[in-house]
Image (tube, rainbow, N blue to C red):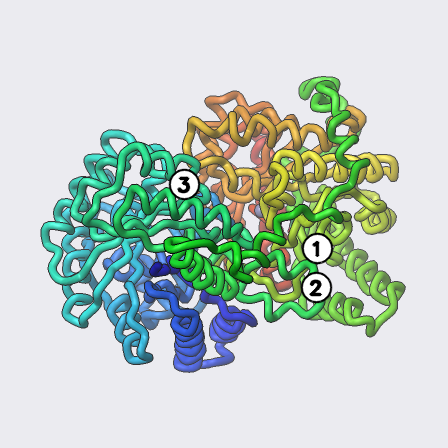
Amino acid sequence: MKTSVIGYPRIGKNRELKFASESFFKNEITEAALLDVAAELRKDSLLKQKEAGISFIPSNDFSFYDNVLDAAVLFNIVPDRYKTLGLSELETYFAMARGYQGEKGNVKALAMKKWFNTNYHYIVPEIDDNTEIKLNGNKPVEAYKEAKALGVETKVALVGPFTFLKLAKYTGDKTAKDFVSSLVTGYIELIDKLAAEGAEWVQIDEPSLVKDVDSEDKALFREIYQSILKNKKSVKILIQTYFGDIRDIYSEVTSLDFDGIGLDFIEGRKTLGLVKTNGFPADKILFAGLVNGKNIWRNNYAKTIDALKELKAVAANVVLGTSCSLLHVPYTLDSESKLSDDYLKHFAFAEEKLQELRELSELTDIADNGNVAAQATFTDNQQLFQGRVDSVDEAVKKRVAGIKDSDYTRLPDFYEREKIQKEKLNLPLFPTTTIGSFPQTQDVRQNRQKFRKGLISVEEYMEFNKNKIAECIKLQEEIGLDVIVHGEYERNDMVEYFGENLSGYIFTEKAWVQSYGTRCVKPPIIWGDVSRKKPITVEWSKYAKSCTDKPVKGMLTGPVTILNWSFPREDISIKESTLQIALAIRDEVLDLEANGIDIIQIDEAALREKLPLRKSDWYSEYLDWAIPAFRLVHSGVKPETQIHTHMCYSEFTDIIPAIDDMDADVITFEASRSDLQILDSLKENNFKTEVGPGVYDIHSPRVPSVDEIVKALSDMRSRIEDRKLWVNPDCGLKTRGETETKASLINLVKAAEQIRKSGAES
Ligand code: GLN
Ligand code: ZN
């Protein structure tokens, strides 16, 4: 049986691309040096896959920042404000991704959004009425040729035109429909060029097909592919879907003249049923995504072989593949020296997944003519699924079973609490605050490293961080912020940090996954039932409080985010895991309160991320337990304790009632990079929770001016009552430099002061 990989990680086993790019941004290395690092990484990945015997290896899956941005640039979708900077091609590309502030100008980055239900972010292409879409680049062709020169025949991966048009933002009067024909012409020209180079296969990624597809979408889809397929010459076309099933459009997809159709059998709950009920065309190849591209647990061979057997009964040609790009899993278990094999044998990262594909392909061939039970690869695999005894904690199970309905409700109600809190906290109108973390400078990371390596004592480690906290608080007081944070210096990552302090978690050393651009995360692994061993953040928050008379905000990560940014278990439901975590964080909330912390922020940065891609599943499969899990964390506090939450990205326009139902007292979220679109919806929905829509974008090093912030605040005030409006950046500051952070926060406070004054005048 042949095998296929949809995409491979690209940041580098040791994050080489990240470090090279960051050096390039700081002008420490040349463009040529960065290109070299990238070429080396691509070569490694191609050869790895070739060695593993993968039949369909992707090219053009590499990107310096993001593939959607690559596609935008490829088709000439570069807004004028970036073109006129007069930068080099690569620098213009980075200006779109990260913003630019320098001698050639001052522009913000393009919007960035989460890629479907993952923690990867794509750059939103921006199309205006004057955008002239046309093929204006060669990246996919170069990628194909480069692989070929290395002796690797590849299928060229392209972001699909349907998905691209669905994800783009239209700033003028024109909409997707107005650009179909020019975009399709571009794709056709590109495919022709690939054909001329001898490419055999093109993989066109259309994950948007797993969402709700209405009749208008279907028409758009048909229009696109009828033209593309009509012009098809020698190249075979694989339409690749992932992150779910394509129930709304299965018959259209299978009736068109594709040569291959890629379906996801892991997240696509209905995929197997669709294929069995509707059949699969005999003249096409079914690329069956059965090896999970997102999670890191070993594949259960018996189940996969059974599924393949069922598929082969329906489809004449089946290729075994990954369920989505391997971009979402780390590189290799080889880099993990600390975890024993008792753990590691349960996992497969990208490289190990290649082995799984190979073994499964061999086993399926054997299964065709006999029995796999005698094969060691099979029996070894089956042993992994006998149950992991050390993952069970009866006390935790009992506590979850004992949760009462009333535990999900905080009393008294929001309005009552709002009154009590206003009186107690006595904050000015438009209170200023930050989202929690301050720049994690070199010294902060070094201190943590030294401690981890045993080079300094726990006392030395603590003292360093306490000094940092004291400095940070002094800085915030100088700047004039109203609600103070301790700066989160003790945290490497907002999820890993809590994971490390909870039992049931295990950790990797190098299991990095790209989040956006050069930013990577290292999700911890939920191995067993989760509980809190002892207070986690209390000492830091108590110390911070002792440094100032201003209110200090305690800082926690919420259960849904902890779950969503971990690799979850596959042997119990994610709902159950989340409730276990919620109870652990609830204990921490109560301990903070008992230690005099009267404002507690429980971050749910990733709550939106796992919202099912189909509307009909939103509540029943997710919000119905995720929102109560959040309430369970804070329902035990006193009315005067103010609960904040924070969400990254403001794409929750459609679920505003659910967000309000988290019943926090204040919510802060990203808004600056998506033009404050959400404010109207907040107003329409009578959003009760007080809000701090971020007034500037922290994902970019740019310093916002006072005027810019005042303008953002005026926009906000037209839709949010003054007494409910908070002033803050749109996310934590840990990835930023100290200088730009200070300058930005000074402007933020000045802007708040300015509107307080003008408010008093009006
Ligand atoms: N409190 C966290 C911080 O400030 C929140 C980060 C996030 O939302 N991603 O870093
Ligand atoms: Zn955030």
Q: Secondary structure at mark 1?
A: strand
Please give the count of numbered marks on the rendered protein: 3
Q: Secondary structure at mark 3?
A: loop
Q: CA distance from mark 2 to mark 1?
A: 8 Å
Locate residue 455: give its quadrant.
Answer: bottom right
Q: Label 2 neighbourhood size at 10 Å, few (<14), some (14-19), many (20+)? A: some
- Residue 411, placed above or below residue 187: above
Marks 2 & 1, CB-CB < 8 Å contact:
yes
Q: Secondary structure at mark 2?
A: loop
Q: Quadrant of the C terminus?
A: top right
Residue annotated with mark 1: 506
Locate residue 100: give its quadrant.
Answer: bottom left
Is 4 positioned to the left or the right of 441 in the image? left
Residue annotated with mark 3: 244
How far across and down, in percent of the image, does residue 651 sit? 46, 38
Q: Quadrant of the N terminus?
A: bottom left
Return the disc, 1 or 3, that comes first in the chain's sequence: 3
Locate residue 270: give its quadrant.
Answer: top left
How far across and down, in percent of the image, does residue 657 sit? 53, 24
Residue annotated with mark 2: 339
Residue 758 in sight here: yes
Residue type pointed to by label 1:
Ile
Residue 523 vs residue 166, the one in the foreground: 523
Marks 1 & 3, CB-CB < 8 Å contact:
no
Q: Residue at x 24, y 41 (%)?
A: 253
Residue 168 vs residue 752, the one in the foreground: 168
Q: Residue at x 30, y 49 (%)?
A: 286
Residue type pointed to by label 2:
Leu
Marks 2 & 3, CB-CB < 8 Å contact:
no
Q: CA distance from mark 2 to mark 3?
A: 32 Å
How far across and down, in percent of the image, does residue 304 sit? 46, 49
